[in-house]
Amino acid sequence: RAVLSRLRSPYAFCPVEPRNMGIDLEAGGRNKVKHRSAPKSENVYLKLLVKLYRFLARRTDSDFNKTVLKRLFMSKTNRPPLSLSKCAKFMSDKGEGKIAAIVGTVTDDARMYEVPRMKVCALRFTETARARIIKAGGECLTFDQLALQAPTGDAVVLLRGPKSHREAVKHRGAAGVPHSHAKPYVRAKGRKFEKARGRRASRGYKA
């Protein structure tokens, strides 16, 4: 019986013991690439910038060029805008002759009365932001102009806008839970809208 059962086994004449299937670590297993290698946008001007900074990242030892290239690939939510006031604040202690570089949009800030003289490079400027920078005696550069002036990123300060200030981020989490600061999706802020139980001591309890 033992011999017959051995003969019936699919591994009866197999000289090597069967093992579990392994993971192909390279082809499609554990090594997942979690970052972009090109922008999703079809914008030809962005693609030309990518071509330029690919070359600079490859042919120079500058980490600045590698970082700019990586940020050019990013989605719009990962390239948040930076206001003029924040840009001026970050550049105030950097000294003279420095260039601020933002891989994103530079926006105006109406709360700021006087704009200091700055040299700013960005993917895009709002109309009023550009006008105010130029009026203050500053300069608005594009990234191809920056590549000619500072090919390795010397004397360039790379800045980023805040990612957490988007309206969608304010709604993340459970609204109405004690100690939660998540913003609820409410039609209005009037007396009738989500102001009853849990919001007033006279209606059950106040959280």
Image (cartoon, rainbow, N blue to C red):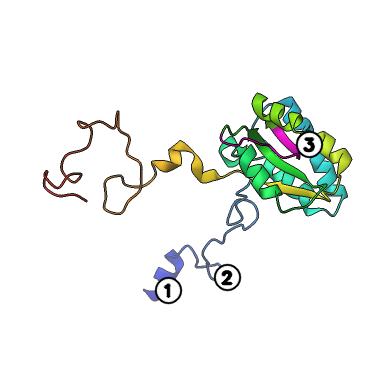
| x and y percentages locating residue 90 in the rendered image | 67, 49
Is residue 126 something that shows in the picture?
Answer: no
Neighbourhood count class around disc 3 (C-alpha, 10 Å): few under 14, some 14–19, many 20 upward: many
Is residue 113 something that shows in the picture?
Answer: yes
Q: Main secondary structure of the magenta part?
A: loop
Q: Secondary structure at mark 1?
A: helix
Name the front one of labels 3 and 2: 3
- The region drawn magenta spans 111-123
| x and y percentages locating residue 26 in the rendered image | 65, 55
Residue 75 in which image quadrant = top right
Compared with residue 20, is residue 149 higher up or lower down, i.e. above or below?
Answer: above
Provide the residue designation for mark 3: 143
| x and y percentages locating residue 21 in the rendered image | 54, 61
Considering only order in the chain, which callout, 2 or 3, is on the residue closer to the N terminus?
2
Residue 113 sits inside the magenta stretch = yes
Provide the residue designation for mark 1: 3
Considering only order in the chain, which callout, 2 or 1, is on the residue closer to the N terminus?
1
Who's the residue at 30% across and 33% down the image? 186
Neighbourhood count class around disc 1 (C-alpha, 10 Å): few under 14, some 14–19, many 20 upward: few
Who's the residue at 29% across and 32% down the image? 189
Spatial CA distance of label 3 from label 1 is 78 Å
Considering only order in the chain, which callout, 1 or 3, is on the residue closer to the N terminus?
1
| x and y percentages locating residue 118 in the rendered image | 75, 40
Q: Secondary structure at mark 2?
A: loop
Amino acid carrying mark 3 in the image:
Phe
